[in-house]
Image (cartoon, rainbow, N blue to C red):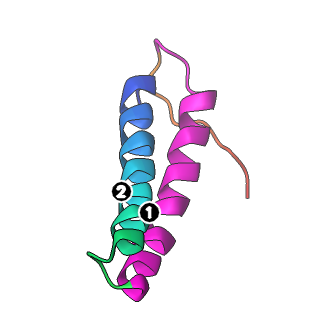
């Protein structure tokens, strides 16, 4: 996995979770739907940011981040 790809996916997941919270706060999205989106998007955000942090720029390897 390239460092750029991991960063894009991580930031996209973070933006999706934040947007769901904002839409719920503004009343455009039911709170339960925003919570479901956050439950799905937040782990992806954490995993892909960790992959970005550990990835080397020139290699195509996915580093082990542990459990």
Crowding at dot 2, Cα within 10 Å, few <14 / some 14-19 / many 20+, comes out as some
Name the secondary structure under disc 1. Answer: helix
Depth check, mark 1 against mark 2: the one in front is 2
* 2 w.r.t. 58: above or below: below
Quadrant of residue 9 within the rendered picture: top left
The residue pinned by badge 2 equals 16
Quadrant of residue 7 within the rendered picture: top left
Please identify the quadrant where the N terminus is shown.
top left
Q: Position of residue 36 (x, y in %)?
A: 42, 80
Q: Position of residue 5 (x, y in %)?
A: 36, 32
The residue pinned by badge 1 equals 41
As rendered, which of 51 and 21 lies closer to the eye?
21
Please identify the quadrant where the C terminus is shown.
bottom right
* 29 w.r.t. 2: above or below: below
Secondary structure predominantly adopted by residues drawn in magenta: helix
Residue drawn at (42%, 83%) of the image: 31
Residue lying furthest top in this view? 58
Magenta includes 13?
Answer: no
Residue drawn at (42%, 87%) of the image: 32
Q: Position of residue 14 (x, y in %)?
A: 45, 50
Q: Which mark identifies residue 10? A: none
Magenta includes 34?
Answer: yes
As rendered, which of 59 and 3 lies closer to the eye?
3
Contact (Cβ within 8 Å) of mark 1 with mark 2: yes
Residue drawn at (37%, 66%) of the image: 20
Q: Which residues are magenta?
A: 31-58
């Amino acid at each position: 996995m390239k460092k750029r790809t991991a960063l894009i996916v991580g930031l996209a997941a973070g933006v999706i979770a934040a947007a769901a919270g904002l839409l719920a706060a503004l009343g455009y999205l039911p709170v339960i739907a925003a919570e479901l989106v956050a439950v799905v998007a937040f782990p992806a955000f954490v995993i892909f940011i960790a992959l970005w942090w550990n990835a080397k720029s020139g290699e195509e390897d996915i580093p082990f981040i542990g459990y």
